[in-house]
Amino acid sequence: MSLHPKTVAKALQEHFTGDIPVMKAPIAHKKLMTSIKSQLEKSKGIIISIYYSRRDNEPDKLCHFEVSDKEDGYYNSDSFTLKFNENNELMIKHFSSRAMVYQIEQIYTFIDRLKVEYQKKKARQLKREKINKLKQQAIVAKVKEIAKEDRFEFSVREYSIKLKLTVRIEGGKIVEFDIPYNKFQEVLKDLRSVIQDIRELQKSGISFKIRNDSGR
């Protein structure tokens, strides 16, 4: 599980604050990075990257690391880079977002903050999945009721934001409906009449297709 870039950018700006950034002479860059890497390697859910781009002229003077919500390894992690700028000030980057580091300890407490954000996101996801499961059950129960009374076969496929309903109609044909969870009550209200109308059209020999407008 990774966080949205805007969430990370906001966390960077809020967390890394201070008066004077960490500054080191070029000769001390490697020593500090070695110390930071050693400390990060002790933390669960942290992976120090051994891969560097061609633009990294001195890879031993920077640190690429990944933070994961899985304590036992890599899983959709968020990537960061620690490096010194042209003024020998230590900074942390996440894609286009960046912040100055004012205390080395801020790096480790920032990682703790990210792990809290992972847990919050996971809790929101579990809550959403639970609500969607209840909506799925309500949709299937209603479709079963309609199918029993109007005598047709159906199947469903569950997705993260919708349920796909497939109804078998006359002539060996099928019709599919995408039912968004956030609009399932409105859809169910008209579903029976829509299915009945489609079946009647099929019986009368009229067939049709619904396509996205290509602009032609």
Image: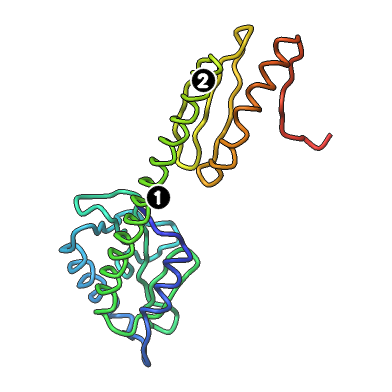
Please tell me whether mark 1 or mark 2 is closer to you in this view. 2
- Amino acid under disc 2: Ala
Q: Which residue does the image show at 42% across and 56% down from the upper left? A: 53
Task: Classify mark 2: residues with Cα within 10 Å, few (<14), some (14-19) or many (20+).
Answer: some
Disc with the residue nearer the chain's start (1 vs 2): 1
Q: Which residue does the image show at 21% across and 66% down from the upper left? A: 40
| Label 1: element kind | helix
Residue occupied by mark 2: 147
For this rendering, which residue is in front, 76 or 201?
201
Label number found at residue 31:
none
Residue occupied by mark 1: 128
Name the image colouring.
rainbow
Calculate the distance from the C-alpha at mark 1 to the C-alpha at mark 2.
Answer: 28 Å
Rendered image quadrant of residue 86: bottom left
Q: Residue furthest top?
A: 171
Horizontal and vertical percent for residue 64? Answer: 33, 62
Horizontal and vertical percent for residue 100? Answer: 40, 80
Task: Classify mark 1: residues with Cα within 10 Å, few (<14), some (14-19) or many (20+).
Answer: few
For this rendering, which residue is in front, 105 or 51?
105
**Vertical side of 90 occupied by 37: above or below:** above
Horizontal and vertical percent for residue 148? Answer: 49, 18
**Vertical side of 199 occupied by 73: above or below:** below
| Label 2: element kind | helix
**Quarter that holds the C terminus:** top right
Please count the marks in the image. 2
- Amino acid under disc 1: Arg
Q: Residue furthest left?
A: 42
Q: Which residue does the image show at 33% across and 80% down from the upper left? A: 26
